[in-house]
Image (spheres, rainbow, N blue to C red):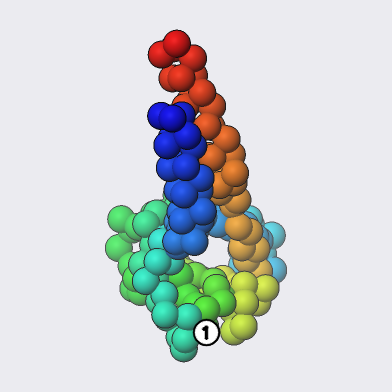
């Protein structure tokens, strides 16, 4: 009887938990296509919790984490920013990331911005301007990092319940 109670509890959790919003994780990558840094690559990752979304209008979600490697330096949420890093949604659709900061590069200043897409992440891009008047842009690929499947969690939980049951015998 105790085994059946555990089984019902695990099955209930498996159906309720996936219905709730979860932390979303994305990988970022791209290369500058124009300007002084043409050909230079960049990459990073970010995560955020989308639980508070209303799914209507333009919405900004604070990031839980962000790391971005650019021109040999890693930037993150502790980097002094001109614009706070946010995930951007339009009517419930993730359109990308918004973030801007200035940094010292080669004796000058580099102003760097990530600009979200208009309708989804396919037109997300990066732009930069230097104190020397050099500027350029590049594409930014935003790829979802899959979370472990809820079924895997349920099976692991059932396995733990079965092991406890066998030890109790």
Instruction: Pick whichever, 163 or 67, lies toward us.
Output: 163
Instruction: Pick whichever, 73 or 6, lies toward us.
Output: 6
Q: Quadrant of the N terminus?
A: top left
Query: Is residue 38 visible to us here?
Result: yes
Residue underneath mark 1: 91
Disc 1 on helix, strand or loop?
loop
Graded by Cα atoms within 10 Å as few (under 14), some (14 to 19) or many (20 or more), the crowding at tag 1 reads some
Q: Is residue 21 above or below residue 115?
A: above
* Residue 29: quarter of image: bottom right
* Residue 85: quarter of image: bottom left
Q: Tell me which residue sits at (47%, 34%) in the image.
A: 4
Horizontally, residue 78 falls left or right of residue 38, namely left
Q: How many marks?
A: 1
Q: Position of residue 59 (x, y in %)?
A: 42, 80
Q: Position of residue 26 (x, y in %)?
A: 55, 57
Q: Quadrant of the C terminus?
A: top left
Instruction: Pick whichever, 113 or 77, lies toward us.
Output: 77
Horizontally, residue 31 falls left or right of residue 71, namely right
């Amino acid at each position: 009887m105790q085994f059946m109670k555990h089984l019902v509890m695990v099955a209930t959790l498996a159906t309720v938990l996936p219905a709730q919003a979860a932390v979303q994780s994305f990988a970022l990558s791209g290369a500058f296509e124009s300007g002084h840094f043409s050909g230079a690559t960049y990459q990073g990752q970010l995560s955020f919790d989308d639980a508070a979304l209303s799914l209507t209008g333009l919405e900004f979600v604070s990031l839980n984490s962000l790391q971005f490697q650019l021109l040999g330096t890693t930037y993150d949420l502790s980097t002094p920013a001109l614009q706070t890093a946010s995930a951007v949604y339009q009517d419930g659709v993730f359109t990308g990331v918004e973030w801007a900061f200035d940094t010292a590069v080669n004796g000058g200043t580099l102003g760097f911005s990530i600009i979200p897409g208009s309708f989804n992440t396919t037109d997300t891009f990066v732009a930069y301007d230097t104190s020397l008047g050099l500027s350029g842009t590049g594409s930014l690929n935003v790829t979802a990092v899959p979370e472990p499947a809820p079924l895997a969690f349920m099976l692991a939980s059932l396995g733990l319940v079965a092991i406890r049951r066998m030890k109790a015998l």
